[in-house]
Every structure is written in C-alpha cells, then in structure tokens.
Image (tube, rainbow, N blue to C red):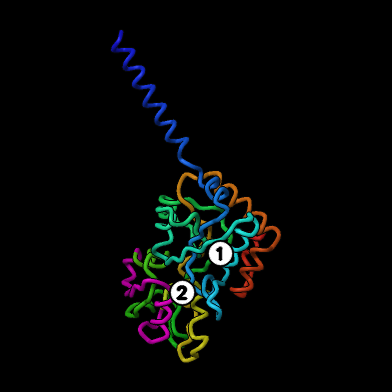
Amino acid sequence: MMKRSFYTVAVATVCMAALGSVAARADLLDDVMKARKVRIATDLAIPPSGMVDGNMKPTGSDVETAQLLAKDWGLELEFVQTTGATRIPNVQTNKADIIISTLSVTPERAKVIDFTKAYAALQSVVGCLKSLEVKNWEDLKGKTIAVSRGTTQDTELTNMKDRNLTLARFDDDATMVTAALSGQADCVATSATIVNQIGVKNAARAFEPKVVIRNFDLAIGLRKGEPRLTEKLNEWITTNLKNGKLNEIYKKFHGSELPADMRG
C-alpha cells in the first residue's frame, strides 16, 4: 500500500512539474507585447525588398511592411540583419521574433517553422543577360547559374538533377548580383524583381527573366507552436490587404500590384 501511494505521489509530482514547465514557458506574443518591441529578421541586401538608402537607413518593401506592423501594434522595431540561409535559424534560436524577408512558403520550411497567410507574392525565375538566347531549360545547359545559398531557388534547382544545371552559390543576393555585374555569371536564379534590377546602372550587363521556376506566396515566418501570435499576425495581414496598404507598399517598390485574388 505504501509502495502504491509512493508511486501515485511520484507520478503526480512529475505531472505537476510538467504542467508547471508548460505554464512557465512564456507565450511569444506576450513576450513581444511586454517588451514593447518586436525583433524582425530582414535581409537588407536584396533590393527592392530590403536595402539601405543614401543615408544608410533601411528601406524596401519588406522594411516598410515591418515598419507598418510595428506602428500598428505600437511597438519599437528592431531589425535583425539576416541572409537567405540564416532567416529561419534566427527565429529558431530566438535571435528574432518573426521573419519578414521575402520568405516563400514551401513544404520543407513548414516542417521547421510556422507561416502566416501570404502578405505578398514572388515570381521565382532564372534570368540571364538580355543578349542571350534562352527560352527554356534546355537552353540553360552549359551555362553557370548564380544563386543565393539557402534560398528556394537554390533548393529548386538543386533538385532538378535531370536538367544537368551548373550552379554557383553565393552567400547572399548582393554578392550574387555583383557576380552577375562583374561577368562571373551570365544567369542568376532569384526573383523577377531582382533580375530586372540588374544592369540598371550598367546597361551593358542588363538582365531579364528567361525561365519561370515557380510563383510563390510570401509570408511571415515564426517559430513552431505560437498560435496566438500567428492568429494576430493573420488578422493584421487581412486588414492591411483589404485597406490596400500592403498593396501600396508592394507597388511602390516592385512596380506592380499584388495578385488580384490576394488583394480581396
């Protein structure tokens, strides 16, 4: 009888400890609101989504989206500088609360982080020098395609083993674009927006989209298991798609409107 009682008490103690541990684990939304600050991972080297202006201040469509969010929630905004490869680790290791950085929704990423509903869209393409005759995947054989490490383009092209593509990986979009402008690569895999930016200051190295890889939804990323924060972010996105503010930001920097079905 004493053994049974001891066992019962032991189990109850373990259960209470477990419940206490869950209760002690602060909810991220509560943490953010209590701190009165939101830490947002944003790549500032991928114009026009993220960049710095002449006064070295952050600007771009993702930057203004982050600024609008912080303003609407009455929070201080802290940008956590990131690259394509470090965006997800930043929220997994609590260096950032959320990601607003051209983060496209993929099944692979959804296994390790959660996504909000889409706030913008991205056309992923292979772009090449305008002078190159490239109309399909077959025309890309034998050409080196520059790509930013850890991006969806990197993943997509790496998995196209049957196409025998030659990839040159760079740490971020800025160095990838530099490689294109310097002649290290005549093709790049990135967003159509970035492709159209290449060569603006050097017409001799002007690029254009050649082959569409895929169209992606862009969403806000956050660590797994934060349903309250996800819900609040979704409400904010819905509101600002309907009132046109997110579309205004996108059009300002990308020169085109969001898809009609996204604008509602």
Could you tell whether 263 is left or right of 176 in the image? right
Q: Residue 111 — which label?
A: none
Please name the residue that numbered disc 1 is placed on.
121
Q: Nearer the viewer, residue 78 or 223?
A: 78
Q: Amino acid at mark 2?
A: Val
Quarter where residue 173 is shown: bottom left
Quarter where residue 131 is shown: bottom left
Q: Is residue 73 above or below residue 255?
A: above
Q: Is residue 137 above or below residue 71?
A: below
Could you tell whether 226 is left or right of 263 in the image? left
Residue depicted at x 37% and y 71%: 171
Q: Amino acid at mark 1?
A: Ala
Q: Nearer the viewer, mark 1 or mark 2?
A: 1
Start-end of magenta stretch: 159-187
Q: Quadrant of the C terminus?
A: bottom right
* Residue found at the very far left of the displayed protein: 3
Is residue 173 found inside the magenta-colored segment of the image?
yes
Asked which secondary structure carries label 1, the reply is: strand
Residue depicted at x 34% and y 13%: 5
Please name the residue that numbered disc 2 is placed on.
211
Q: Tell me the CA gap for discs 1 and 2.
A: 17 Å
Residue depicted at x 58% and y 47%: 231
* Residue found at the very far bottom of the displayed protein: 204
Residue 156 percent across, percent down from the top left? 39, 64
